[in-house]
Amino acid sequence: MRTTVDIPDGMYRRLKARAAGEGRSAKALILQGVEQVLKSAPVASGRRVTLPIVQSRRPGTVRIDNARIYDVISFP
């Protein structure tokens, strides 16, 4: 598969220098980085969400602010 990625000039120069220093191509170094990211990617928990997440005293009219959302839903 072929794709296009925009890499900032300074980062690309560092990439090319590192690849040359290791005797590899920039492509090989990029693919190694992608593989590492994919191996360490978190696996979806598969946890189902029961709706509604936030209970309303009067269904159909939810008046809630950010502070209340943070109280009700646990964020990582």
Image (cartoon, grey):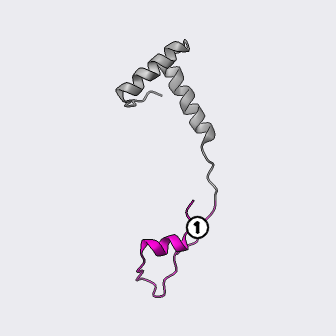
Tell me where residue 9 appears, x and y as whole percent.
35, 26
Q: Say which of 12 and 4 sits in front.
A: 12
Whether residue 22 is situated above or below residue 32 in the rendered picture: above
Residue 58: image quadrant is bottom left
Circle 1 Cα neighbour tier, 10 Å, few/some/many (<14 / 14–19 / ≥20): few
Whether residue 76 is situated above or below residue 40 in the rendered picture: below
Q: Is residue 44 left or right of residue 6?
A: right
Name the dominant secondary structure of the magenta segment.
Answer: loop
Query: Magenta part of the protein: which range?
Result: 47-76
Q: Say which of 62 and 17 sits in front.
A: 17
As drawn, the residue found furthest toward the bottom would be 58
Q: Is residue 65 magenta?
A: yes
Where disc 1 sits, the SS reads loop
Name the amino acid type tagged 1. Answer: Val
Q: Quadrant of the C terminus?
A: bottom right
Q: Is residue 53 visible?
A: no
Q: Residue at x 62, y 40 (%)?
A: 40
Which residue position is annotated with label 1?
Answer: 49
Q: Is residue 10 left or right of residue 28?
A: left
Tell me where residue 25 appears, x and y as whole percent.
50, 16
Q: Residue at x 50, y 19 (%)?
A: 18
Whether residue 33 is situated above or below residue 16 in the rendered picture: below
Whether residue 67 is situated above or below residue 35 in the rendered picture: below
Q: Say which of 32 and 70 sits in front.
A: 70
Q: Say which of 46 and 6 sits in front.
A: 6
Q: Residue at x 55, y 69 (%)?
A: 73
